[in-house]
Image (cartoon, rainbow, N blue to C red):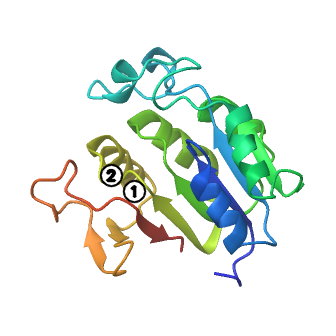
Amino acid sequence: MNEIEGDIVECGVWRGGFSIFLSYIFPNRNIWVCDSYEGFQPTEGAKYDYPQERHTPRYTHNSIGPLAISLEEVKGYFDAYKLGDQERIKFIKGFVKDSLPTAGIEKISLLRIDVDGYSPTLEVLDELYDKVQPGGYIVFDDSSLYETLDAMKFFFKSKDIEPFVFHPITDEKLNIHTRYIPEGDSGLIGGSYIIKK
């Protein structure tokens, strides 16, 4: 992927561990660390209506809770790994539909989406898909969740993207309309990815 132009962007970072990992894998790239740092956005603020959404009712949007990790805490982890003072590490705070349009992201070589919901997945894709460069990767961390898979199906169809992803370990090509894990939530493997054409 080193020949693909663009930055590394993660949307939905929790404690920042994967962004820290990517910062070491790609030491010469800008790393965008995008999160609300307040948990899930309320459904009434979502761009897309999706009655089957599970996460907002379970994890109330506030600054404390099982998935609401503050920006200060995440920055602390970057400091612990000697990354806190690097200008290439860019923290973006806010719900993606509000923060991404003004973030200043221009070109992307790797986009990792880990926002756990239907509307925020589509909101990320609406804003950033066209910025992913040809040959760049889009990783759907939550492809194992039915909310995310439904968002992927909707977006792929709207953009005339063929309905396939790649297995995160074997790189096997998987049809998004096929259940590969019978007892799984969506039937797809988490972390499935596509390569932008």
* Residue at image mark 2: 153
Q: Is residue 89 left or right of residue 71?
A: right
* Residue at mark 1: 156
Q: Do the residues labelled 1 and 2 touch (CB within 8 Å)?
A: yes
Q: Is mark 2 on a helix, strand or loop?
A: helix
- Residue 132 visible somewhere in the drawing: no
- Is label 1 in a helix, a strand or a loop? helix
Q: In which quarter of the image is the N terminus?
A: bottom right
How far is disc 1 from disc 2 in space, using C-alphas?
Answer: 5 Å
Q: What residue type is labelled 1?
A: Phe
Q: Out of 150 and 142, give the one closest to the viewer.
A: 142
Q: Is residue 53 left or right of residue 123?
A: left
What's the residue at 45%, 29% (across, down)? 66
Figure check: 192 above or below 90: below
Q: What residue type is labelled 2?
A: Lys
In the drawing, does residue 30 fall left or right of residue 126?
right
